Amino acid sequence: MTERAVKAVTPFAFRADFGPQPEDMPPADDPARVSFTGEEIAGLIAQVRAETLAEVARVKAEAESERLAKVTAEMKRALGEVVQLVSHIEGAKFDTGTEDRLRREIESIARRLIDGQGDLFAGAGQTAPDAAKEGTP
Protein backbone atom coordinates (compact mmCIF):
# COMPACT_ATOMS: atom_id res chain seq x y z
CA MET A 1 0.00 0.00 0.00
CA THR A 2 1.27 3.43 -0.86
CA GLU A 3 1.38 5.96 1.92
CA ARG A 4 0.73 9.55 1.01
CA ALA A 5 0.52 12.48 3.24
CA VAL A 6 -2.84 14.24 3.38
CA LYS A 7 -2.27 17.79 2.30
CA ALA A 8 -5.83 19.19 2.56
CA VAL A 9 -9.28 18.06 3.70
CA THR A 10 -12.37 19.52 2.11
CA PRO A 11 -15.63 19.51 4.08
CA PHE A 12 -18.53 17.38 2.79
CA ALA A 13 -22.00 18.89 2.70
CA PHE A 14 -24.04 15.95 4.05
CA ARG A 15 -27.61 15.57 2.76
CA ALA A 16 -30.00 13.07 4.31
CA ASP A 17 -32.11 12.50 1.19
CA PHE A 18 -29.47 12.41 -1.54
CA GLY A 19 -32.09 13.93 -3.86
CA PRO A 20 -31.58 16.82 -6.22
CA GLN A 21 -30.50 20.03 -4.65
CA PRO A 22 -32.96 22.91 -4.74
CA GLU A 23 -30.81 24.64 -7.35
CA ASP A 24 -30.98 21.50 -9.54
CA MET A 25 -34.79 21.46 -9.60
CA PRO A 26 -36.54 23.28 -12.46
CA PRO A 27 -38.50 26.36 -11.51
CA ALA A 28 -42.21 25.85 -10.76
CA ASP A 29 -43.31 27.90 -13.78
CA ASP A 30 -41.15 25.84 -16.18
CA PRO A 31 -43.35 24.39 -19.01
CA ALA A 32 -41.27 21.19 -19.07
CA ARG A 33 -42.15 20.45 -15.45
CA VAL A 34 -44.80 17.77 -14.89
CA SER A 35 -46.61 17.56 -11.60
CA PHE A 36 -49.20 15.06 -10.36
CA THR A 37 -51.28 14.92 -7.21
CA GLY A 38 -51.60 11.72 -5.23
CA GLU A 39 -55.13 11.20 -6.57
CA GLU A 40 -53.94 11.61 -10.15
CA ILE A 41 -51.15 9.06 -9.66
CA ALA A 42 -53.58 6.63 -8.01
CA GLY A 43 -55.98 7.11 -10.94
CA LEU A 44 -53.22 6.46 -13.48
CA ILE A 45 -52.14 3.32 -11.63
CA ALA A 46 -55.75 2.08 -11.53
CA GLN A 47 -56.16 2.80 -15.25
CA VAL A 48 -52.96 0.93 -16.17
CA ARG A 49 -54.01 -1.99 -13.96
CA ALA A 50 -57.47 -2.17 -15.56
CA GLU A 51 -56.04 -1.98 -19.08
CA THR A 52 -53.49 -4.69 -18.28
CA LEU A 53 -56.14 -7.00 -16.82
CA ALA A 54 -58.33 -6.44 -19.88
CA GLU A 55 -55.44 -7.27 -22.20
CA VAL A 56 -54.62 -10.44 -20.25
CA ALA A 57 -58.27 -11.51 -20.39
CA ARG A 58 -58.37 -10.80 -24.13
CA VAL A 59 -55.25 -12.88 -24.77
CA LYS A 60 -56.62 -15.76 -22.68
CA ALA A 61 -59.96 -15.65 -24.51
CA GLU A 62 -58.20 -15.58 -27.86
CA ALA A 63 -56.05 -18.60 -26.93
CA GLU A 64 -59.12 -20.51 -25.70
CA SER A 65 -61.00 -19.62 -28.89
CA GLU A 66 -58.13 -20.92 -31.03
CA ARG A 67 -57.99 -24.15 -28.99
CA LEU A 68 -61.75 -24.68 -29.37
CA ALA A 69 -61.57 -23.97 -33.11
CA LYS A 70 -58.86 -26.63 -33.53
CA VAL A 71 -60.79 -29.19 -31.47
CA THR A 72 -64.01 -28.43 -33.35
CA ALA A 73 -62.27 -28.86 -36.70
CA GLU A 74 -60.86 -32.20 -35.54
CA MET A 75 -64.32 -33.25 -34.32
CA LYS A 76 -65.88 -32.36 -37.69
CA ARG A 77 -63.16 -34.32 -39.48
CA ALA A 78 -63.73 -37.39 -37.28
CA LEU A 79 -67.51 -37.26 -37.73
CA GLY A 80 -67.04 -36.85 -41.50
CA GLU A 81 -64.92 -39.99 -41.52
CA VAL A 82 -67.64 -41.86 -39.60
CA VAL A 83 -70.24 -40.78 -42.17
CA GLN A 84 -67.90 -41.87 -44.96
CA LEU A 85 -67.41 -45.26 -43.29
CA VAL A 86 -71.18 -45.77 -42.98
CA SER A 87 -71.62 -45.04 -46.68
CA HIS A 88 -68.90 -47.61 -47.52
CA ILE A 89 -70.62 -50.21 -45.34
CA GLU A 90 -73.96 -49.49 -46.97
CA GLY A 91 -72.35 -49.90 -50.40
CA ALA A 92 -70.67 -53.19 -49.48
CA LYS A 93 -72.46 -56.52 -49.71
CA PHE A 94 -72.67 -57.65 -46.07
CA ASP A 95 -75.32 -59.92 -44.68
CA THR A 96 -77.97 -58.19 -42.57
CA GLY A 97 -76.54 -59.31 -39.20
CA THR A 98 -73.03 -58.08 -40.01
CA GLU A 99 -74.29 -54.77 -41.36
CA ASP A 100 -76.45 -54.20 -38.26
CA ARG A 101 -73.49 -55.00 -35.96
CA LEU A 102 -71.20 -52.65 -37.89
CA ARG A 103 -73.84 -49.90 -37.86
CA ARG A 104 -74.27 -50.25 -34.06
CA GLU A 105 -70.50 -50.05 -33.54
CA ILE A 106 -70.23 -46.97 -35.74
CA GLU A 107 -73.17 -45.33 -33.99
CA SER A 108 -71.45 -46.07 -30.68
CA ILE A 109 -68.27 -44.40 -31.93
CA ALA A 110 -70.23 -41.39 -33.19
CA ARG A 111 -72.10 -41.15 -29.86
CA ARG A 112 -68.80 -41.14 -27.95
CA LEU A 113 -67.45 -38.42 -30.24
CA ILE A 114 -70.55 -36.27 -29.78
CA ASP A 115 -70.74 -36.91 -26.03
CA GLY A 116 -67.04 -36.14 -25.82
CA GLN A 117 -67.75 -32.57 -26.91
CA GLY A 118 -68.34 -31.90 -23.21
CA ASP A 119 -64.60 -32.51 -22.80
CA LEU A 120 -63.94 -29.44 -24.94
CA PHE A 121 -64.67 -27.30 -21.89
CA ALA A 122 -63.06 -29.52 -19.27
CA GLY A 123 -59.66 -27.93 -19.92
CA ALA A 124 -61.08 -24.51 -19.16
CA GLY A 125 -62.58 -25.78 -15.89
CA GLN A 126 -66.13 -25.00 -16.98
CA THR A 127 -67.52 -28.50 -16.36
CA ALA A 128 -66.80 -31.13 -13.80
CA PRO A 129 -64.86 -34.17 -15.15
CA ASP A 130 -67.67 -36.59 -14.15
CA ALA A 131 -70.36 -34.45 -15.80
CA ALA A 132 -68.58 -34.58 -19.16
CA LYS A 133 -68.54 -38.40 -19.15
CA GLU A 134 -72.09 -38.77 -17.87
CA GLY A 135 -73.67 -39.62 -21.24
CA THR A 136 -70.95 -41.94 -22.54
CA PRO A 137 -71.92 -45.62 -22.89
Image (tube, helix red, strand yellow):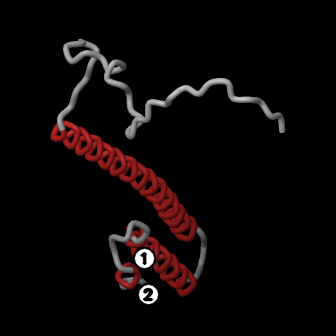
Q: Position of residue 54 (x, y in %)?
A: 29, 47
Residue type at the position of mark 1: Arg
**Mark 1: secondary structure:** helix
Q: Position of residue 60 (x, y in %)?
A: 39, 53
**Is residue 82 positioned above or below 63 on the image?**
below
Residue type at the position of mark 2: Pro
- Disc marking residue 111: 1
Horizontal relation, residue 98 to residue 24: left or right:
right
Query: Observer-nearest residue: 73 or 86?
Result: 73
**Is residue 124 positioned above or below 69 on the image?**
below
Q: Quadrant of the C terminus?
A: bottom left
- Disc marking residue 124: none
Q: CA distance from mark 2 to mark 1?
A: 8 Å
Q: Residue at x 47, y 62 (%)?
A: 75
Horizontal relation, residue 37 to residue 52: left or right:
left
List the residue tagged with mark 2: 137
Residue 68 image-quadrant placement: bottom left
**Mark 2: secondary structure:** loop
Total labels drawn:
2
